[in-house]
Image: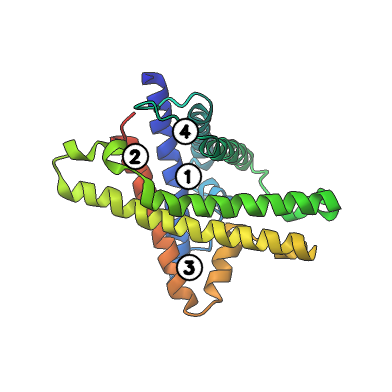
Amino acid sequence: MSVLKNIARTGYIAKGIIYLITGILTFMAAINIGGQKAGKEEVLGFIRKQDLGSTLLIVLSIGLLCYATWRFAQAFVDPQKRHGKPKNKGQRFALFISGITYVSLAGLAVLAAGGSIGNSGIKNSSILTTELGLWILAGIGLIFIGRGVYQITRLFKTNFNRKFDLESMIDEKKRKIIKNSAYLGMSARAVIFFTIGYFALKGAITANLNEIKDTSDVFSFIETSFWGSFQLGIVALGFICYAIYMFLSAKYRSF
């Protein structure tokens, strides 16, 4: 378990870095001081432009694979099973999908390190022009909506006292930071997942692939809505809070 624990902690840090850069770049765009509305490819491209960018991306990809490994372990082995309460099939499926997602993101990081990352959006896939493809797209939309619902349910069901052993944590301020960063971060993620899922379903129903939106597209959509820049800034801050929650998970989470 000690090896798996270190793998998990490394993974949480890598995931936190992705969310931190996404949140900072998007918040800067929201208040018009540079930055950009960033999805995964924009974040990887930003890292690629830094000094030793390719090396940083390779290190990040290893961290993302660590997170995927932890998710697969949770899905198939359930290493944190306690008091005879193993995860149900729905939770295991969600963890498996999460693992697949971060394996894909690690692969994109490797491609970005080699300078070959491009527009790899799902809307460019030829299979989506077929009837089967539209059903697949609808399924993807439902998965994202399900992930949004999962984020909301976690707000009410997560036992932070058990997950972080908060009762033994003397610093009350630290306990509040863990909980509040989780609540704000999960809420922001839910907004993004719901919106991506909605437009994927809309694209499948109308057979219009231009309706498909990734994270950066959703940020642009939010910005064009009522009080758009303000809402965009709030969601971006939520992403930064979620990054803080990931870093705190790496340090304080019980395994």
Which numbered marker is on residue 87? 4
Query: Is 248 on the left-hand or right-hand side of 169?
Result: right
Give the amino acid type for the residue marked by disc 4 in the picture.
Lys
Residue 137: x, y in percent?
Answer: 73, 53
Q: Judge depth for marks 4 and 3 and give the one in front.
A: 4
Q: In this view, does 192 lie above or below 12?
A: below
Query: Is 130 on the left-hand or right-hand side of 93?
Result: right
**Residue at 64% in and 53% down:** 142
First in residue order: circle 4 vs circle 1: 1
Give the amino acid type for the residue marked by disc 1 in the picture.
Asp
First in residue order: circle 3 vs circle 1: 3
Query: Is 254 on the left-hand or right-hand side of 123?
Result: left
Q: How far apart are marks 3 and 1 (CA)?
A: 23 Å
Q: Distance between the residues labelled 2 and 1?
A: 28 Å
The image quadrant that residue 33 belongs to is: bottom left
Residue in front for this viewpoint, 169 or 228: 169
Q: Judge depth for marks 2 and 1 and give the one in front.
A: 2
- Location of the N terminus by quadrant is top left
Q: Judge depth for marks 3 and 1 and give the one in front.
A: 3
The residue to which callout 3 is attached is 29
Which numbered marker is on residue 249? 2
The residue to which callout 1 is attached is 51
First in residue order: circle 2 vs circle 1: 1
